[in-house]
Image (cartoon, rainbow, N blue to C red):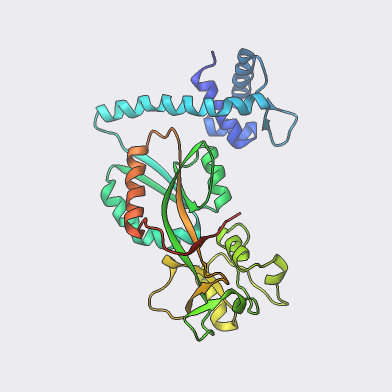
């Protein structure tokens, strides 16, 4: 059979899609990496990579083997983890990715709590958009993704964390609640493409891309900045419930014609065979305790797709 080292080379090449970058990642020369992968393909009896493609792509055979290779390396890494635990020098590394519209409030709320309950964990956190999180999970670059659901994939464990209402920041409206019809004649200030809240907003308010365009327009990656644009130029933007600033006015509940209130469900995605579940579970429980797990009445969970 092929060796652990060859499997590591294969995974690196699949990640980088280019021999030179993969060899640098593995700290070997390009000819060495290329030769070892070629030997692995000869042993297995079929090509793993389609070298006619640029960038490189896995063959159908390679795609079938990829999750097996990933599981093999995951199990192999348990050896060093077990030895480190025995010697009392073990320190787990957790790689977390969160979409920006959740990390904006979750990190200030929970970072200190996570550090307190996980003293022997090195927690690395980055902001990624939804599609980037799904790709990072697929490539085993992160251990947990926090995003808006729904997401269905048999490779990952989906854990509901909480639901949050989505409100309109619409200071010019005098009432505490507004109907969708009232928003249709107002300018919508949107997040940039790739942010799931943008897509949810367009679904619920029945917007088309052209509807959001004016002769002068701005799309941003920060809800704070969009709120400032609303304050200065009118219109509205949508804001998740836990993002709302308690000392700021102008947030309005939105009602549809059938009395539904727009909301999103925040979920955690974790690989099914994660060896780090005991630590990930602690992170998840802290989130659920902070924001609650009970569903609220009449909420309409919006799709991010």
**Where does residue 40 sit, x and y in percent of width and height?**
60, 17
**Where does residue 231 sit, x and y in percent of width and height?**
54, 82
For the point 32% across and 38% down, the residue is 278
Q: Is residue 36 visible?
A: yes
Query: From the viewer's perspective, is residue 66 above or below residue 135?
Result: above
The residue nearer to you, when weighing 266 against 80, is 266
The residue nearer to you, when weighing 247 against 36, is 247
For the point 55% across and 62% down, the residue is 197
Quadrant of the snapshot with the C terminus: bottom right
Quadrant of the snapshot with the N terminus: top right
For the point 33% across and 41% down, the residue is 279
Q: Is residue 109 left or right of residue 240?
A: left
Q: Residue furthest front?
A: 258
Q: Is residue 30 visible?
A: no
**Where does residue 143 sit, x and y in percent of width and height?**
44, 41
Query: From the viewer's perspective, is residue 16 above or below residue 99?
Result: above
The residue nearer to you, when weighing 113 against 243, is 243
Q: Quadrant of residue 200?
A: bottom right
User: How many numbered callouts?
Assistant: 0
Query: From the viewer's perspective, is residue 46 above or below residue 142?
Result: above
Query: From the viewer's perspective, is residue 158 above or below residue 288?
Result: above
Q: Quadrant of residue 234?
A: bottom right
**Where does residue 88 sit, x and y in percent of width and height?**
24, 32
């Amino acid at each position: 059979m092929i060796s652990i080292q060859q499997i590591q080379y294969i995974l690196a090449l699949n990640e980088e899609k280019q021999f030179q970058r993969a060899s640098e990642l593995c700290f070997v020369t390009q000819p060495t990496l290329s030769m070892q992968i070629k030997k692995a393909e000869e042993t297995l009896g079929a090509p793993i990579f389609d070298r006619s493609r640029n960038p490189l792509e896995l063959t159908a055979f390679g795609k079938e083997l990829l999750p097996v290779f990933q599981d093999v390396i995951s199990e192999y890494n348990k050896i060093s983890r077990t030895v480190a635990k025995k010697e009392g020098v073990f320190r787990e590394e957790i790689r977390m990715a969160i979409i920006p519209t959740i990390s904006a409030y979750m990190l200030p709320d929970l970072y200190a709590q996570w550090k307190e309950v996980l003293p022997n964990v090195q927690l690395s956190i980055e902001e990624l958009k939804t599609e980037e999180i799904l790709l990072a999970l697929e490539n085993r670059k992160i251990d947990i993704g926090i995003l808006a659901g729904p997401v269905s994939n048999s490779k990952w464990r989906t854990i509901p964390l909480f639901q949050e209402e989505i409100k309109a920041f619409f200071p010019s409206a005098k009432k505490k609640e507004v109907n969708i019809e009232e928003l249709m004649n107002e300018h919508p200030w949107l997040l940039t493409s790739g942010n799931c809240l943008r897509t949810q907003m367009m679904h619920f308010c029945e917007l088309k891309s052209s509807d959001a365009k004016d002769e002068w327009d701005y799309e941003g990656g920060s809800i704070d900045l969009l709120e400032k644009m609303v304050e200065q130029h009118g219109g509205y933007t949508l804001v998740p419930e836990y993002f709302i600033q308690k000392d700021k006015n102008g947030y309005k509940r939105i009602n549809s014609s059938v009395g539904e209130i727009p909301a999103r469900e925040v979920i955690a995605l974790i690989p099914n065979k994660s060896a780090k579940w005991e630590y990930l579970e602690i992170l998840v429980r802290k989130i659920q305790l902070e924001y609650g797990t009970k569903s609220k009445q009449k909420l309409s969970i919006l799709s991010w797709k």
